[in-house]
Amino acid sequence: MRVLLDTHVALWLLGEGVHTLADDLVETLADPRTDVALSAASVWEIAIKTGLGKLRVDSDVVAAAEDAGFSPLPVNHQHARLAGALPRHHGDPFDRMLVAQAQLEDLTLVTRDPRMRAYDVPILPA
């Protein structure tokens, strides 16, 4: 299985919020057969929200993601073009980028955000 973490799920997995996730989901994500991707868009979103004081992160997210074995997913031109063309079911441009990446890279999006279901993308509920 290949999955892409929504930003909030990545933060929960890398911090103290892992207890908010179902045990079977944590097991699936920890399974070595599961390729867990973290988008550069999520790292950017975390950096912006931290800089604005809307989010507090006590660790280096990139280092923690590397330690957790997450695969980095860069943003490319095709991702950007599709994210910009997606319907505005979701107002957050970072979330639309994750949808575009999941669609183009054939990834299942791990999220708790119900608005993501409006898009044509496989979802693994968090």
Image: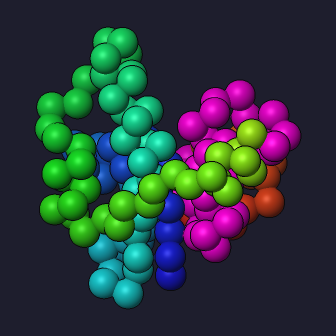
Answer yes or no: is residue 22 visible: no
**Residue 89 placement (x, y as % from top left):** 80, 37
Answer yes or no: is residue 43 visible: yes
Q: Looking at the image, which is closer to me, 9 or 2? A: 2
* Up/down of 45 relative to 99, above or below: above
* 96 left or right, relative to 89: left
Segment colored magenta: 85-112
Q: Is residue 105 magenta?
A: yes
Residue occupying image coordinates x 71% and y 28%? 91
Q: Looking at the image, which is closer to me, 27 or 76? A: 76
Q: Residue furthest right?
A: 87
Residue occupying image coordinates x 23% and y 30%? 57
Residue occupying image coordinates x 32% and y 12%? 53
Residue occupying image coordinates x 30% and y 84%? 32
Q: Residue furthest front?
A: 77
Q: Quadrant of residue 122?
A: bottom right
* Up/down of 123 relative to 77, above or below: below
* 62 left or right, relative to 121: left
Q: Looking at the image, which is closer to me, 80 or 21? A: 80
**Residue 33 placement (x, y as % from top left):** 38, 87
**Residue 11 placement (x, y as % from top left):** 33, 43
